[in-house]
């Protein structure tokens, strides 16, 4: 087939695909029907200095005392994946965007001290009732860490925000202890335990922008306990004068289920995650993922080292634009290490095997990229598909999952363009359409009704991509 005829065929395929998707019904956000989610996450208007405050929204959840984990939040009814659970402005933020964590924490503590100076009694009580680690400060000595007082204060707060349906809020407020005397150390204790560093992902490009990250303190979001398999997905929107946190259900949830997010980078191995949690928060994580991985932690560390070495080789080959045959050799080696991951997984019951493999999503990501560069498109497509499945298991509806959806679609586009038309399988448009549909669904679960702007961005990206490949083909 002549090049012109072939590119016309490709344009036709892309056009048909997108018009089918554009006509699909749009998801509607139930609790806040007037909310413009696409605008809410629009980083361009953010950088031009938006000054908008959102009203706090608390969805179907309530505070409970949970054995061995302090206070936590649980669902007050069944919840569907993607449902809005919380919209909350930070009570205090660090001053410098993109500062290193340690600087952000110091700045946040400073901001909290300042804010406490002008806060009313109810706000101050909420602050002192946040969990404070014993290692850093002395909040507990002053009576503010009494479990009953803390639960009561938070129940009343949730009730005031209007959604918890908890009767506790009707009662008079509890009598409060004296304000802590050791202000600085008590503030540090609370900030150490409850601060979050916002992850500023761009909702269109799905790039993580570290320069925009801020440390912040949120009263309600502070009650989410940790699991390495989160069932809540968090996103942030930056404003001129603060930052709003949005929490959504990452998966379908039953009534009474504890809502948990992940305090650490979820794609690390079990020892890395557990050590970090222990150092920063003082507890040993016993989540279902850690329980599966811990007995094989030594093997996980060895495999991670081997994988990292191969990925570094791949990265240097990329840097010097090595030939596909050279990259093919690295693909073979990465595959060998990943075979070891699969062999080790066989020591576990079948239901636990995906959790073990999920520690190495980043290795599969490397395999997919290398396979793509080597021209092994089917292998790359399969690897990206596995990345999606594993990311959806340990960080469902997160930007990590979303990113793999996007990478899969792009890889499929490359495969289509690199194959002679006669070799293209009949199902190519169907599988591409299915991949786009799943990407949109994941985007909607994470960003609310913002899926449309994501799809149109994907369309533009793919069109640019096709055009660039055609241009290369002509030279
Ligand atoms: C941000 S607070 C979460 C709310 C806290 N449970 C409370 O009572 O206010 C973080 C603290 O909660 C506790 N925590 C969170 N997740 C936990 C888990 N999976 N296991 C045990 N303790 C946990 C730890 O004490 C941690 O330092």
Image (cartoon, helix red, strand yellow):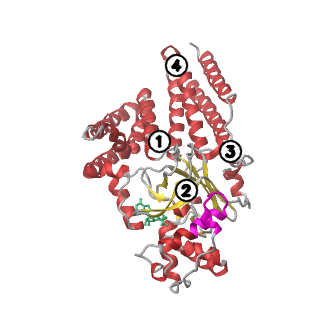
Residue beneath disc 1: 392
Secondary element at image label 2: loop
Q: Name the residue at 33% across, 38% down.
A: 334
Please state the extent of the stretch shown in magenta in the rendering.
153-170
| Marks 3 and 2, how far apart at CA | 25 Å
Q: Residue 246 location, x and y as percent?
A: 61, 54
Q: On residue 162, which mark appears?
A: none
Residue sitting nearer the eye, 380 or 199: 199
Q: On residue 427, which mark appears?
A: 4
Image quadrant where residue 20 sits: top right
Q: Name the residue at 56% across, 40% down.
A: 442
Q: Residue 375 location, x and y as percent?
A: 43, 28
Q: On residue 30, which mark appears?
A: 3
Instruction: Check if mark 4's residue and mark 2's residue have beta carbons within 8 Å.
Output: no
Neighbor class of circle 4 (other Cα within 10 Å; few <14, some 14-19, many 20+) is few
Q: Name the residue at 58% across, 69% down.
A: 94
Residue beneath disc 2: 199
Magenta-span inclusion, residue 167: yes
Of the image marks 4 and 3, the number of the one nearer the N terminus: 3
Against 114, residue 281 (above or below) is above
Residue sitting nearer the eye, 234 or 209: 234
Q: Residue 34 location, x and y as percent?
A: 75, 47
Instruction: Check if mark 3's residue and mark 2's residue have beta carbons within 8 Å.
Output: no
Magenta-span inclusion, residue 443: no
Q: Residue 112 location, x and y as percent?
A: 59, 75
Secondary element at image label 4: loop
Secondary element at image label 1: helix
């Amino acid at each position: 087939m002549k090049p012109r005829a072939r590119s016309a065929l490709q344009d036709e395929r892309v056009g048909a695909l997108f018009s089918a998707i554009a006509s699909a019904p749009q998801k509607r956000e139930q609790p806040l029907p007037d909310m413009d989610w696409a605008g809410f996450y629009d980083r361009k208007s953010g950088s031009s200095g938006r000054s908008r405050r959102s009203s706090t929204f608390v969805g179907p959840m309530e505070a409970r005392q949970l054995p061995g984990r302090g206070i936590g939040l649980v669902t007050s009814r069944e919840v569907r994946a993607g449902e809005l659970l919380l919209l909350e402005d930070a009570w205090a933020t660090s001053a410098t965007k993109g500062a290193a964590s340690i600087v952000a924490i110091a700045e946040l503590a400073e901001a909290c001290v300042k804010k406490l100076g002008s806060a009313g009694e109810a706000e101050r009580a909420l602050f002192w009732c946040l969990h404070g680690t014993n290692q850093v400060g002395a909040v507990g000595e002053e009576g503010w860490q009494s479990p009953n007082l803390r639960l009561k204060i938070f129940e009343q707060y949730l009730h005031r925000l209007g959604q918890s349906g908890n009767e506790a809020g009707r009662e008079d407020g509890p009598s409060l202890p004296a304000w802590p005397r050791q202000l600085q150390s008590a503030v540090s204790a609370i900030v150490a335990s409850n601060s979050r560093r916002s992850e500023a992902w761009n909702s269109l490009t799905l790039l993580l922008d570290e320069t925009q990250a801020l440390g912040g303190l949120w009263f309600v979001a502070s009650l989410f306990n940790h699991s390495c398999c989160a069932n809540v997905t968090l996103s942030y929107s930056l404003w001129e004068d603060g930052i709003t946190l949005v929490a959504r259900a990452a998966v379908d949830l039953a009534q009474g289920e504890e809502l948990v997010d992940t305090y650490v980078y979820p794609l690390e191995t079990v020892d890395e995650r557990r050590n970090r949690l222990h150092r920063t928060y003082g507890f040993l994580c016993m989540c279902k993922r850690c329980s599966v991985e811990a007995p094989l932690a030594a093997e996980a560390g060895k495999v991670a080292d081997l994988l990292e070495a191969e990925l570094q080789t791949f990265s240097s080959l990329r840097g010097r634009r090595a030939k596909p045959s050279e990259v093919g050799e690295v693909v073979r080696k990465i595959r060998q290490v990943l075979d070891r991951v699969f062999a080790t997984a066989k020591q576990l019951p079948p239901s636990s095997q995906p959790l073990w493999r999920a520690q190495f999503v980043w290795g599969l990501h490397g395999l997919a990229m290398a396979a793509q560069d080597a021209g092994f498109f089917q292998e790359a497509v399969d690897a990206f598909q596995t990345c999606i499945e594993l990311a959806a298991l340990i960080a469902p509806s997160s930007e990590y999952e979303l990113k793999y959806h996007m990478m899969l679609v792009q890889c499929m586009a490359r495969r289509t363009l690199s194959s002679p038309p006669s070799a293209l399988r009949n199902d190519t448009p169907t599988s591409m359409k299915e991949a786009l549909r799943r990407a949109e669904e994941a985007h909607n679960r994470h960003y609310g009704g913002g899926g449309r702007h994501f799809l149109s961005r994907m369309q533009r990206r793919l069109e640019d991509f096709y055009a660039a490949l055609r241009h290369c083909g002509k030279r």
